[in-house]
Image (tube, helix red, strand yellow):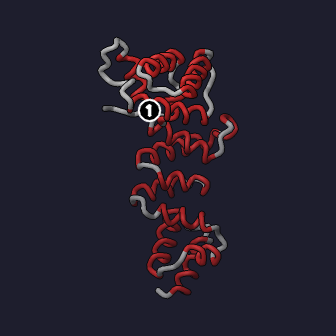
Amino acid sequence: MDKITALENIYDTWNDSELSLADKINGVSSAYYSAGLDLATTAAFIKATPAELETLLGLSELDDEIIELISEVNPPNTTWMMIMEASDEEIRQALESLKSNRDHSYGKDTNYTASEFVYQKMLEASGPTIEQKVGSLSGDDLKHAFKKGSDFDALNDWQKKFIKSVAAQRKMGKTLTDKQINSLRGTLTGLAEKGAITRNSIDGDQDICDRILDALEIYQ
């Protein structure tokens, strides 16, 4: 297929409202790759953004079964990027939830956009992130991390003040900011690397150490 014909086919496929999403994914990707087109030129020709076209092409890399499921649910294009990068199980759970809740106005009840809703369901399928687990550590856990770090001389002055501060905030039930969580993750990882927090601790604090290491997803 020559490039002009491919561009015309992609234009027709992209703008055909009667085609299913699966047909669009397969039709656009087939013409695009067979003719060796470039992203910017093709996107301009079909009056789409390069990001929109790139995401649809990315969906073509998924298994046929998943593509058919995506087509059946027909999620908004704002969700395509997340779907493209998710595991099959995360995709299935997110799409099933999106399909089930579409008639119940998920946005109205939860203040979620479609993309936020899909992200939340993927998160539920994959489990909490390291950052979420670190941010959920209790004030007592962090206070103990401060003690271990001090005992092992594994904390600098700033880190000592920082852990004492976030431990106090967590004891009061406060939610840590993203910046605090990232700093806390780095500090706790440093304690693990220096041997202050270990599994099978002989200091009578194995449960606390294990909770911290589990949050960091350090399993050795």
Label 1 CA crowd tier, 10 Å (few <14, some 14–19, many 20+): some
Q: Residue at x 64, y 69 (%)?
A: 48
**Residue 63 screen position, x and y as percent:** 39, 58
Q: Is residue 219 left or right of residue 216?
A: left
**Residue 6 screen position, x and y as percent:** 52, 82
The answer to whether residue 114 is above or below residue 72 is above
**Residue 97 screen position, x and y as percent:** 52, 41
Task: State the count of labels.
Answer: 1
**Residue 217 screen position, x and y as percent:** 40, 34
Q: Which residue is mark 1?
A: 190
Q: Is residue 110 left or right of residue 143?
A: right
Residue 11 is at least partly visible in this image = no
Q: Residue at x 54, y 17 (%)?
A: 139
The answer to whether residue 7 is above or below residue 74 is below
Nearer the observer, 86 or 133: 133
* Label 1 element class: helix
Residue 1 is at least partly visible in this image = yes
Nearer the observer, 143 or 25: 143
- State the quadrant of the C terminus: top left
Q: Residue at x 59, y 64 (%)?
A: 51
User: Mark 1 is on which residue type?
Assistant: Gly
